[in-house]
């Protein structure tokens, strides 16, 4: 059964406050809660497993350093973790591309270099807007959306991890998608 949203927000705030105060056990709790989700995203994004593992460590260091900035009124903890993870992975990939480009400076310039920057910026804005809408969903629906679409988990895996029947997970996903479509007025290609 899902924890009421107000209560979950307070639990998340307490966790991040403990992390900001330097409590090692709190960092372990955060990792236990989101480590597999962050790793799945990193593994899907990074070229090698070693780079994915490094990225996960870097994301959790970033979460630890910015713990005092978490505000449950602005975003659920899962949304905040996902945004930081996504930004970190994008930054890491951009830096690695920049190193590759810097090593090939003696080559002729490529037409249209940088043309995709506005598209990426637009995608980042759309992703943030989507995550804001996801954040308004009830906890179970939000968790299922994030784990299924951002974390790449199957509905069966989500049900097993949450100790929730598969039918309940499927219903939560269906309801979440309906709510997201209603709130956006457009079809999502999740």
Image (tube, rainbow, N blue to C red):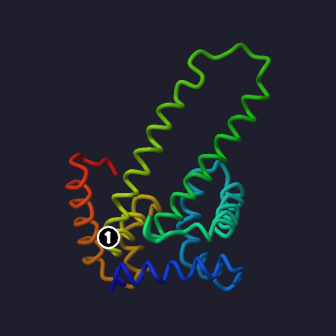
Residue 129 horizontal/vertical position (percent): 38, 51
Question: Is 162 rendered above or below residue 53?
Answer: below
Q: Would you identify the image quadrant in which residue 154 lies?
A: bottom left
Q: Is residue 25 left or right of residue 7?
A: right
The quadrant of the picture occupied by the N terminus is bottom left
Residue at point 59% right, 71% down?
35
Q: Nearer the viewer, residue 146 or 50?
A: 146
Question: Is 75 rendered above or below residue 19?
Answer: above
**Residue receiving disc 1:** 141
Q: Would you identify the image quadrant in which residue 75 lies?
A: bottom left
Residue at point 48% right, 83% down?
11
Residue at point 52% right, 67% down?
37
- Count of marks placed on residues: 1
Q: Is residue 157 left or right of residue 88?
A: left
Badge 1: residue crowd in 10 Å (few <14, some 14–19, many ≥20): many
Residue 15 horizontal/vertical position (percent): 57, 81
Residue 6 horizontal/vertical position (percent): 37, 80
Residue 2 horizontal/vertical position (percent): 34, 83
Q: Nearer the viewer, residue 115 or 65?
A: 65
Residue at point 66% right, 57% down?
52
Question: Is 165 rendered above or below residue 77?
Answer: below
Secondary structure, mark 1, is helix
Q: Would you identify the image quadrant in which residue 56 lies?
A: bottom right
């Amino acid at each position: 059964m899902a924890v009421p949203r107000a209560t979950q927000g307070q639990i998340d705030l307490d966790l991040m406050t403990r992390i900001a105060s330097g409590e090692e056990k709190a960092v372990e709790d955060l990792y236990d809660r989101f480590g597999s989700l962050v790793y799945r995203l990193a593994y899907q994004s990074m070229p090698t497993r070693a780079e994915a593992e490094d990225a996960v460590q870097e994301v959790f260091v970033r979460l630890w350093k910015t713990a005092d900035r978490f505000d449950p009124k602005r975003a659920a903890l899962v949304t905040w973790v996902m945004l930081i993870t996504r930004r970190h992975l994008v930054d890491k990939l951009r830096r690695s591309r920049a190193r590759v480009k810097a090593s090939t400076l003696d080559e002729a310039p490529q037409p249209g270099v940088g043309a995709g920057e506005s598209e990426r910026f637009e995608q980042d804005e759309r992703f943030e807007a989507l995550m804001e809408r996801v954040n308004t969903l009830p906890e179970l629906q939000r968790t299922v959306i994030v784990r299924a679409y951002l974390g790449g988990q199957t509905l069966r895996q989500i049900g097993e991890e949450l100790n929730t029947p598969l039918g309940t997970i499927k219903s939560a996903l269906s309801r979440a998608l309906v709510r997201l479509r209603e709130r956006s007025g457009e079809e999502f290609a999740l």
